[in-house]
Image (tube, rainbow, N blue to C red):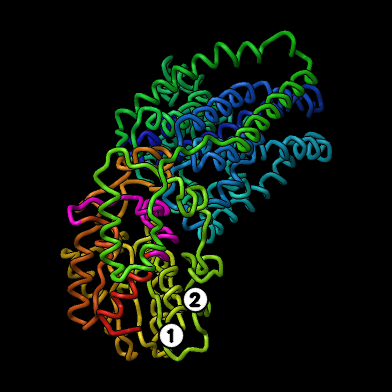
Amino acid sequence: MAVTLVVLDHAGVARLGGGYVGVDVFFVISGFLITSLLVRELTTRDGLSIRGFYARRALRLLPASTLVVVTTLAGSWLFLSRVRFEEYAGDAVSSALYAVNFRLAAAGTDYLAEGSPPSPFQHFWSLAVEEQFYVVWPLLLLLTWRLSRGRRALLAIPLAALCVLSLVLSVTVTEEAPSWAYFGSHTRIWELGAGALLALAADQLQLLPSKLAAPMTWTGLACIATAGVAYGNETPFPGYYALLPVLGTVLVLAGGCAPSRGDAQVLLARAPLVWLGGLSYGWYLWHWPLLVIGPAALGRLPETTTTELSLLLCALALLLAWATLHLLENPIRFHARFRSRPGRALRLGATLSTVAALLAATAYAFPPPIDSGRPARDLKRELAKAATPERRLSQLVEASTGNGNLSLPSNLAPPLPEIKPTRSAVYRDGCHVAYDATSAPACEYGDPASDRVVVLFGDSHAAQWFPALNRLALERGWRLVSLTKASCKAAKVTLRRFGGPYAECDTWRARAVERITEMRPALVIVSSSDAGEPMTPEADPVSQWTNGLRMTYAELGESGARVVALLDTPWPRTDAVDCAALYSLHLTRCANRLPGAIRDESRRTATLRAARSAGASVIDPVPWLCTGGGDCPVLVGNTIVYRDDSHVADAFAEAVAPVLGDRLTEVLGIG
């Protein structure tokens, strides 16, 4: 049940958006099973062979996981984004060493990495959490057994304390740092510990009356199924929400300790399900790399992958799991060479992990090359010297479309691998604040001594224009103040985040507007992404956004500043850098077209209406990125337009500064 929930969720099956709770079911089962085996050994031998325990873990886990790591690394080299390969190779190293969860947690704190294609090694995080738990738990269990002289009630005390601490951390960290809460072992230990505590009480649970045990098992299954159906991407997980699948698993296992007629084994003991459970480890290992690499190997972009194709790939993963179990796992696991010889098993495990890590490190040093064609016009230089920069930009955009063999130029600036790591000053200086912030630091650029103050205000789609405005500020002697926050729209509309109101945005917005009013700037440039869902959607979304924007524009205008509404940019079909790396000699495969490139036409309509009502000026950047015929390329001249699947790249923004400057002069007379 657990592996099926995970696989179907990853395959995109509707109504199973919470299938990720299958991992939590895994954790509880693992804690119960492994602790049961450890307690049995402690009871029968009055001791525990730590060496033997790790030898058994190595034989059980490492042959299959090593095969999957090496195969996935090869598939990534051949088919996935070449600009991300070094990242994937790093993931492979940490997966081989069971530490990838920390790497993923750290990457998840990077706002600009949101929406990026997932790593083909991402699913190894749960195995890393398990093994980190089992580095500590057998030692703690053995120590407690010695001190308590085998009394099980005392065995549970340190583990129960650890579980309570971990659960508290899970709830707290989920609110403050969601990626660390999801991937961190410190927030997941309580789930493994719940299964371990259950194992310590197994003897008593065998005495449960059948009238109680049977309903417990069905109630537990219902809890797991409810979480799988009711939860989704916006559920703040794990936190409190993880209690439902964990409790459900505990109920199934606890009731199952006293088998009775009519309990859940009527379902779970069916031969097909038992067979599937026997393949669960291999299926889990294989399904995710196939879902990530498979479409690319078939020449499909991520957004064109259908659920049907994903299910076919998952079926192939099940076949691979069967082959891996019978041709690799069992032959090694039960080989006479390793029976009762933990030293050999440990050496095999160390060799497998080392080989996988070394192969990944070698691949990191020799990433696949990115093909390129002839040099192209230097976008920044062309616009800087043009008498009419906007007309020259239109010509260069037109020249970047209509050729089916359009290639990355040999003089690409900056090189493709440098686009994503590049961070403008507002990110480096912490001026673009994160989700939980309610105030912004004093971030001033350009000429700090200037009396002419220009403010950039909005979310990350405002911050994307910082390189252009900073260049203009330096050239024209402005004092540039940046006030931007992650996913916080300029409109006075409360947004939904993780199923609840994005209250931090409302607080930050009010404080930012108050601060702008006190500054009395000459100009405020307002921009926001067209993405985002209101907490309470109204029947007429255009009116809702119009009213919210009009209030913001009016309040900003009361400061005496001229207000410019900079419309959102067209969005590429997919992550532009990844696509350019995949199709470096056929970039037209990555281009988008109008009107599909407009994320939300109703937001544009609302912005235009609100600006007209509040007396604000409007600048539309669509002509800077798309042709009159509606083609929106990912490359203009020698510069990639986007850094990901929505944000304009820093180099492109800086290059088009003369175009933005001319528009500001034309609209407002600001020079």
Say left or right for 508 vs 558: right
Pick the quarter of the image with the N terminus.
top left
Look at mark 2 in the image and give the residue it sits on. Answer: 440
Q: Is residue 669 above or below residue 547?
A: below
Look at mark 1 in the image and give the residue it sits on. Answer: 515
Reply yes or no: does residue 650 show up in magenta.
yes
Q: How crowded is the residue under tag 1: few (<14 C-alpha within 10 Å), some, or many (20+)?
A: some
Residue at (50% x, 42% y) in the render: 84
Q: How crowded is the residue under tag 2: few (<14 C-alpha within 10 Å), some, or many (20+)?
A: many
Residue at the top extreme of this rendering: 336
Q: Is residue 279 above or below residue 174?
A: above
Residue at (63% x, 10% y) in the render: 331
Between disc 1 and disc 2, whose residue precedes? Answer: 2
Residue at (30% x, 56% y) in the render: 396
Given residues 415 and 423, the one toward you in this image is 415
Given residues 388 and 469, the one toward you in this image is 388
Quarter residue 270 falls in:
top left
Q: Position of residue 426 (x, y in %)?
A: 50, 69
Q: Position of residue 429 (x, y in %)?
A: 56, 70
Quarter residue 617 falls in:
bottom left
Q: What is the magenta range? A: 628-655
**In the image, what residue type sits under mark 1?**
Arg
**Callout 1: SS:** helix
Asked if the residues shown at circle 1 and circle 2 are in contact, with their CB atoms under 8 angstroms apart, the answer is yes
Given residues 217 and 420, the one toward you in this image is 420
Q: CA distance from mark 1 to mark 2?
A: 10 Å
Q: Is residue 549 above or below residue 77?
A: below
**In the image, what residue type sits under mark 2?**
Ala
Residue at (53% x, 31% y) in the render: 253
Given residues 552 and 151, the one toward you in this image is 552
